[in-house]
Image (spheres, grey):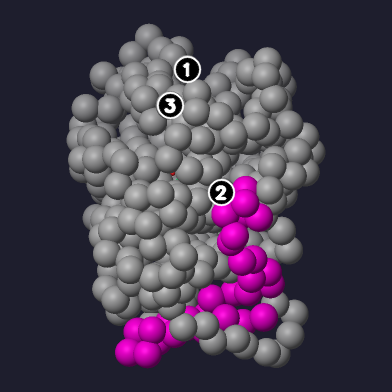
Amino acid sequence: MSRHYRIVIVGGGSAGISVAARLAHKLGGGKDIALVEPSEKHYYQPLWTLVGAGVSDKASTVRPEAGLIPKGVTWIKDRVASFDPDHDRLSLASGEELSYDQLVVAAGIQIDWDGIKGLREAMGKGGVCSNYSFETVDSTWETLRNFEGGTAIFTTPNTPIKCGGAPQKIMYLAEDYMRNKSKVRDRARVIFATPGDGIFSVEKYKRTLEKVVARKGIEMALHHNLIEIRPETKEAVFQIIDSDRTETIPYAMLHVTPPMSAPDFIKQSPLANAEGWVEVDPHTLQHLRYPKVWSLGDCSSLPTSKTGAAVRKQAPTLVTNMFDVIEGRQPSKRYNGYTSCPVVTGYGSLVLAEFDYDMQPAETFPFDQAKERLSMYLMKKYLLPPLYWFGMLKGRA
Ligand code: FAD
């Protein structure tokens, strides 16, 4: 069986729905568009940081996918199994084939829970927790609430991840909770374990965050990559980057950011680059080898920090450029790598990092965004969720 659509979108997450909404506006309806998405639920993941810290309600981060798909767009509730871009076709898990004039790949990033020995079994029990999925985010708040002292370790993996700042945001909130709410800070050691060699990659924000780390008495375990969890003895084993050494650290709390990679079905397809991401031009978002294929968001090769904020700028670029190509022109709009990381530094403070491909600040507000601010925290908590549901996903913002 085979069906043909003018435009097929793979994935109905932040990127897929944003693009679908903009395309439907442009075409005056969605009748020529199909969106392939297996999940009945759509998640606003940026709020999981505040859910894990006991601030926001988990239920407010999920909505039915059906209510977000623009009117007229055909929802194909299935997953893509493989791509055949030489014949402008793809196959679904059901065995059905779809053909297209234009294809948008927006399938997000894959979480490799099996990439750390013992992680899958340990998750959600005995102090091991993660904000990185809807299923596990409760375990963070549960662990933090019950934490009575000992070593709390916050890890980041040696792979690309979505929201590079999220592993440290939850640490700052947890430290604040221990210091000012549960009052156990004097009995706790807080460690940030990262394979990298610093707290942040953009100099301007790094300077502030280094001061935050020092003020909070957080220990930096640089060049540390978590490779094993031993739940029976509550030990975390780290490989020391660029050496054959390991270090074992006992923990009472272990917040894990799991390793991630491009989804397997993309990695195994002709669309992938050597690392597995959909290989697109960093400025036009058009595929480098298949001009009818476009990609954005976490599964794309765009060399910027993978965030929803980045998707917000990528979506209009992709749609303009796709129509330029359909109408016989060169792509006219250029994406500059804009991304944003609202680094929550405590209950009521946030550094709004915004930057581009050159790691230069690309800020929205006229004030110094490297400063910790209550106003920016309130924006993340109260303003950004409605901007997402009613602006970005409707193709309006
Ligand atoms: P997603 O939104 O993840 O959507 C991918 C979709 O593809 C999913 O619906 C999935 O079901 C679907 N899919 C997967 N496989 C297939 C298949 N085979 N066939 C069809 N469909 C498929 N971003 C920010 O901007 N600010 C933040 O503060 C922030 N904080 C974060 C905190 C946490 C804890 C997490 C986890 C993320 C955070 N992010 C943040 C990142 C942000 O959520 C992602 O970058 C964004 O959702 C990427 O959009 P996407 O559409 O590429 O992927």
Q: Is residue 150 left or right of residue 135?
A: right
Q: Is residue 298 above or below residue 68?
A: below
**Circle nearer the viewer, 3 or 1:** 3
Residue found at x 61% / y 66%: 219
Q: Residue at x 47, y 17 (%)?
A: 397
The magenta-colored residue range is 212-240
Front one among 277 and 117: 117
Q: Circle 3 sits on which residue? A: 378
Element at label 3: helix
The answer to whether mark 3 and mark 2 are in CB contact below 8 A is no
Bin the neighbour count of mark 2 within 10 Å (Cα to Cα): few under 14, some 14-19, many 20 and up: many
Q: Disc 2 versus disc 1: distance between alpha carbons?
A: 23 Å
From the top left corner, tell me how far across and down residue 188 is, in percent.
46, 68
Residue closest to the eye, 38 or 60: 60
Whichever of callouts 3 and 1 sits on the residue coming sooner in the sequence is: 3
> Rounded to the nearest whole Å, what is the CA distance between mark 3 and mark 1?
19 Å
Identity of the residue drawn at 27% across and 73% down: 125
> Where in the figure is residue 121, as x and y percent of width and height?
30, 79
Indicate which disc, 2 or 1, sits on the residue closer to the N terminus: 2
Looking at the picture, does residue 86 appear above or below residue 387? below
Q: Amino acid at mark 3?
A: Leu
